[in-house]
Image (cartoon, rainbow, N blue to C red):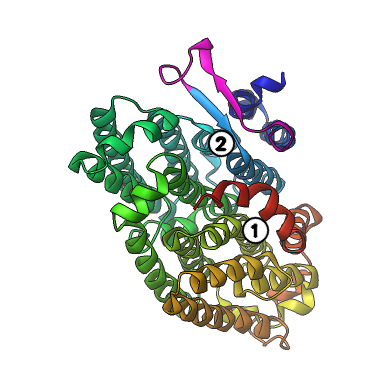
């Protein structure tokens, strides 16, 4: 069974997605329980695979016994193991948050929600594990279609947001596939390891350079990197809370991972960094995105829209790590993927819980909320500290590695960008904390009498918030064992 682990992770999610869909027609609650079981099973397989990789090295699985480069291959190494842990672990926790027809999702489509969530997780795991460029595209589209369906479940304005996402995601997918075609016609292969060996002979080919630019641009659309982020604010504002949490905490990070994988294992650092300006462009537009999106977040009064613009800024931190293209910068970008998943997942669940429990969505109405909901606002405070970059949270250490990477690359402008953006983060998060712990105003006194969130809502929020502290404490272990072995070649 051990040798089949790379394939079992997405297959398990697809199998349980089918079962959850059948049961969802009969009983919504049963569908939810099956989905949680499927996500947990995939997480256990991910943990098992990670342990195996750490003990024996990367695992390669060829479907149908067709060896690469001709057959379809899945690869589980330390970097892909890190990502499947994030996807299945965060996904399992997010699925704990209660969702039912009529509660922030469209009643008529509620029966399919857990099927599509598991398909989204399967698509993301497939992207991470795929050993060839074309099958990565297949799983990319599975995740995109699942995201489109999930956003639309919010009804109303979410339908418009989902359509905007569909247009942008289709453009991004077309760019990526066109780039894969250029690479295939240049070297005659789409297997990543094979392409890595064949490309040096044609590095100066316009089709190779054009293919690389197209692929990276398409993935930048998928990861909502500024200024290609226009689909994200509306989708995260109007989608159901769990969907917004999946989008901000998991989905956009996987596309960033794929760019890192292309740099390290397909085009090679020599080509991406030395022969093209791709990483320099990513670094500078990420720096601009960090500042501009943070300013836009400060200007928002809708809590979820503020979080949406915050996500644009936070994914730009990952982009900055990619653009720095040195070991510490890449480490900071990858570690920020996990940190942001925990922090933003918790924050979007908090936003959904408060909206459901009190009807509040405007930041000005948070006054006095901390006294009525101390556990919820306490979790918010921890997650907000991580977003700002205050120790000992995971967010502090990811920004610390990015700062070290900027200093190592002699990029003092990026050091200033990280520090200024942290101050802007403090502005829009501390204003909420200040209002929450202020005495309640007369206009909000009635809605604040509802008390703490139900335990079923509170549990995943607290798990994610505490996880932010635990991952921060274990940052050296995560970096040394899972991330540094992959990037030290830079």
Q: Which residue is mark 1?
A: 349
Callout 2: 10 Å neighbours few (<14), some, many (20+)? many
What residue appears at the point 60 percent right and 50 percent down from the top-left corner?
A: 242
Drawn side of residue 331 relative to residue 151, left or right:
right
How many numbered marks have been drawn onto this rendered protein structure? 2
The question of residue 476 being in magenta is answered with no
Q: Position of residue 147 (x, y in %)?
A: 47, 43
Q: Position of residue 36 (x, y in %)?
A: 71, 37
Residue 62 makes an appearance in the image: yes
Q: Which residue is mark 2?
A: 125
Q: In the current view of this chain or complex, which residue is farthest to the front?
A: 201
The region drawn magenta spans 53-72
Q: CA distance from mark 2 to mark 1?
A: 22 Å
What residue appears at the point 35 percent right and 66 percent down from the top-left corner?
A: 285
- Is residue 354 depicted above or below 40 in this figure? below
Q: Position of residue 343 (x, y in %)?
A: 64, 62
Residue 163 makes an appearance in the image: no
Q: Earlier in the sequence, mark 2 or mark 1?
A: 2
- Is residue 266 depicted above or below 312 in this figure? above
What residue appears at the point 59 percent right and 66 percent down from the top-left corner?
A: 401
Name the element at disc 1.
helix
Question: Which numbered dot is residue 284?
Answer: none
Drawn side of residue 89 relative to residue 274, left or right:
right
Drawn side of residue 320 relative to residue 15, left or right:
left
Q: In the current view of this chain or complex, which residue is farthest to the top?
A: 65
- Is residue 298 depicted above or below 54 in this figure? below
Q: Quadrant of residue 11?
A: top right
Rendered-image quadrant of the N terminus: top right
Between 443 and 266, the one nearer to me in the picture:
266
Between 338 and 299, the one nearer to me in the picture:
338
């Amino acid at each position: 069974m051990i040798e089949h682990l790379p394939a079992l992770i997405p297959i398990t999610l697809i199998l349980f997605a089918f079962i959850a869909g059948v049961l969802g027609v009969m009983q919504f609650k049963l569908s939810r329980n099956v989905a949680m079981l499927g996500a947990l099973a995939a997480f256990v397989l991910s943990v098992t695979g990670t342990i195996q990789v750490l003990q024996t090295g990367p695992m390669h699985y060829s479907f149908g016994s067709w060896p690469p480069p001709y057959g379809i291959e899945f690869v589980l190494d330390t970097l892909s193991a890190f990502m499947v842990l994030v996807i299945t672990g965060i996904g399992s926790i997010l699925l704990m948050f209660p969702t039912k027809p009529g509660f922030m999702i469209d009643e008529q489509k509620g029966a399919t929600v857990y099927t599509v969530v598991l398909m989204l997780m399967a698509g993301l795991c497939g992207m991470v594990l795929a050993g060839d460029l074309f099958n990565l595209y297949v799983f990319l589209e599975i995740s995109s279609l699942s995201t489109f369906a999930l956003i639309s479940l919010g009804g109303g304005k979410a339908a418009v947001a989902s359509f905007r996402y569909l247009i942008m995601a289709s453009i991004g997918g077309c760019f990526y596939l066109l780039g894969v075609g250029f690479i295939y016609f240049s070297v005659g292969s789409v297997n990543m390891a094979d392409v890595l060996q064949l490309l040096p002979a044609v590095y100066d080919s316009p089709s190779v350079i054009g293919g690389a630019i197209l692929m990276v641009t398409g993935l930048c659309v998928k990861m909502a990197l500024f200024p290609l982020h226009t689909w994200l604010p509306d989708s995260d504002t109007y989608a159901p809370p769990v969907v917004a949490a999946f989008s901000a905490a998991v989905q956009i990070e996987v596309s960033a991972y794929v760019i890192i994988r292309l740099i390290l294992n397909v085009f090679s650092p020599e080509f991406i960094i030395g022969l093209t300006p791709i990483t320099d462009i990513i670094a500078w537009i990420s720096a601009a995105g960090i500042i501009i999106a943070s300013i836009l977040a400060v200007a928002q009064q809708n809590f979820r829209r503020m979080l949406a613009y915050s996500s644009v800024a936070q994914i730009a931190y990952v982009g900055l790590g990619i653009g720095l293209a040195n070991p510490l910068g890449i480490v900071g970008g990858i570690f920020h993927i996990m940190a942001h998943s925990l922090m933003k997942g918790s924050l979007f669940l908090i936003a959904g819980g408060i909206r459901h429990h009190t009807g509040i969505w405007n930041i000005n109405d948070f006054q006095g909320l901390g006294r009525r909901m101390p556990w919820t606002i306490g979790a918010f405070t921890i997650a907000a500290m991580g977003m700002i970059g205050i120790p000992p949270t995971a967010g502090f250490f990811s920004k610390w590695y990015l700062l070290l990477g900027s200093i190592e690359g002699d990029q003092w402008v990026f050091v200033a960008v990280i520090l200024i953006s942290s101050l802007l983060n403090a502005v829009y998060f501390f204003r909420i904390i200040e209002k929450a712990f202020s005495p309640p105003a007369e206009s909000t006194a009635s809605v604040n009498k509802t008390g703490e969130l139900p335990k079923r809502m509170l549990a995943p929020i607290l798990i994610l918030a505490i996880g932010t502290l635990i991952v921060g404490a274990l940052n050296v272990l995560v970096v040394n064992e899972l991330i540094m072995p992959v990037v030290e070649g830079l």
